[in-house]
Amino acid sequence: MGDDIPLAGLIGLLVSLLVLSAFFSGSETALMSLNRYKLRHKARAGHRGAKLAESLLKRPDRLIGLILLGNNAVNISASALVGVVSVQMGGELGFAIGTAALTLIVLIFAETAPKTLAALHPEPIAYISAYIYFPLLKALYPLVWLTNALANGVLYVCGLRQTDSDRYSLSREELRTVVYEAGAMISRRYRQMLLNILDLEKVSVTDVMVPHNEVVGIDINDEADEIASIIRNSQHTRLPVFEDTIDKVLGVLHLRRLANIFTQIEISKDDIRHLLEEPYFVPESTPLSTQLVQFQKGRRRFALVVDEYGDIQGIVTLEDILEEIVGEFTTDPSDDGEDIVNETESTWLVSGTANIREMNRILDWNLPTEGPKTLNGLVLEYLEMIPESGTCLKIGTYPIEIIETKENRVQLARIYQLKDNKPVS
């Protein structure tokens, strides 16, 4: 062959083989580096190259077999050609120099450079390559099939099996990472909403419920005037109705049902009883994701949360769950927004009834959420006693000073936000 083909022709053929080697190396990296979710999106949008690439990647063993067949054939041919050319040009010394030069050239121009380029810009290279590989796979299918059969046989002997499971399914934590890394493609607000949705299974109804001692309801044994006052001043559309205590709940009153009765001078307790809806109870350990589905199935918006003994712990509404996803809709006028007050740049005055998860979310803190739900509960659990005013403690990295204790609970505390173990200044 060396005597029939001019030296210039041999060198040109060698360059062509190196270009093919670079193509096989780069296209392999590009196809294997594709974001499978972007690929599916483009394929469904009608992108021809994406459709071909997706079809090839459904059987990656065949694609890799085809690429390796081509790459090895090209590299072996290039090695043989270099041997011929180098012997013609310099004899045995030329052969040694040619072999070393080919190794360096292949490493740089046919492996490292094209693979790096493909890793940085996988999509255009992969889509163009798919137009070439798709018909080439059909043409060389018998040879590719035989190669894969032998390779899969070796894997089978080693105890490895192919599975039909989705190799690209994501766990919840992996999906959280994808959302985090979306960056500017998703606004910060929407990104936080997506993360909140993913966290619904970790959060139970007790984390968002209105606790037992803060429930606003109607004691049917109260005077009619007092009941009327509660209804007039209520910030809620649904109120639990009970006898003496919330644990003896009779039902739930939807205030819109009082539209006709409320025009009367007096409200009849019997009328209220007839308008009550049957109470709906949920276990305190119910995840928010499950409760959201239950609200939807039962066409309900209001539930009473009970513990393992059947005692009522609080109430949870559909709005509470939605606020866990999108944030607060409104500020409850009864709160006056004073659960958390910024006192100085490094100190906060916090009510003992403040929800720990809300504090973490609003202030970007990291107070422990396993266990007690309120600051009062967290302090009592930590100290194992009811503290007096002036007591100081440190939970995690947050120094806490008890400002006021009332009725056997922490009424108000001052929390210091530290930076490098010093107050923020």
Image: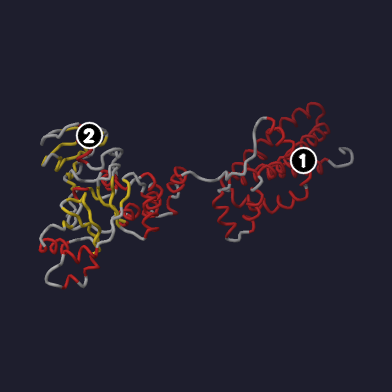
User: From the viewer's perspective, is residue 329 above or below residue 203?
Assistant: below
Q: x, y (%) of residue 142?
A: 79, 45
Residue positioned 26% across, 34% down in the render = 397
Do tag 1 and tag 2 residues touch (Cβ < 8 Å)? no
Q: Is residue 113 left or right of residue 178?
A: right
Residue type marked 1:
Leu
In the rendered structure, find residue 278 and report the number of the disc placed on it.
none
Residue 418 picture quarter = top left
Q: x, y (%) of residue 208?
A: 29, 49
* Residue situated in front as seen by the camera: 349 or 183: 349
Graded by Cα atoms within 10 Å as few (under 14), some (14 to 19) or many (20 or more), the crowding at tag 1 reads few
Q: Nearer the viewer, mark 1 or mark 2?
A: 2
Answer yes or no: is residue 258 visible. yes
Question: Mark 2 or mark 1, which is nearer the start of the sequence?
Answer: 1
Q: Is residue 419 left or right of residue 180?
A: left
Residue 308 picture quarter = top left
What residue would you read off at disc 1?
Answer: 146
Answer yes or no: is residue 403 visible. no
Marks 1 and 2, how far apart in space? 68 Å
Residue positioned 33% across, 53% down in the render = 321
Q: x, y (%) of residue 381?
A: 22, 34
* Residue situated in front as seen by the camera: 381 or 64: 381
Graded by Cα atoms within 10 Å as few (under 14), some (14 to 19) or many (20 or more), the crowding at tag 2 reads few
What residue would you read off at disc 2?
Answer: 381
Residue positioned 43% across, 50% down in the render = 183
Q: Quadrant of the N terminus?
A: top right
Residue type marked 2:
Glu
User: From the viewer's perspective, is residue 297 above or below residue 283?
Assistant: below
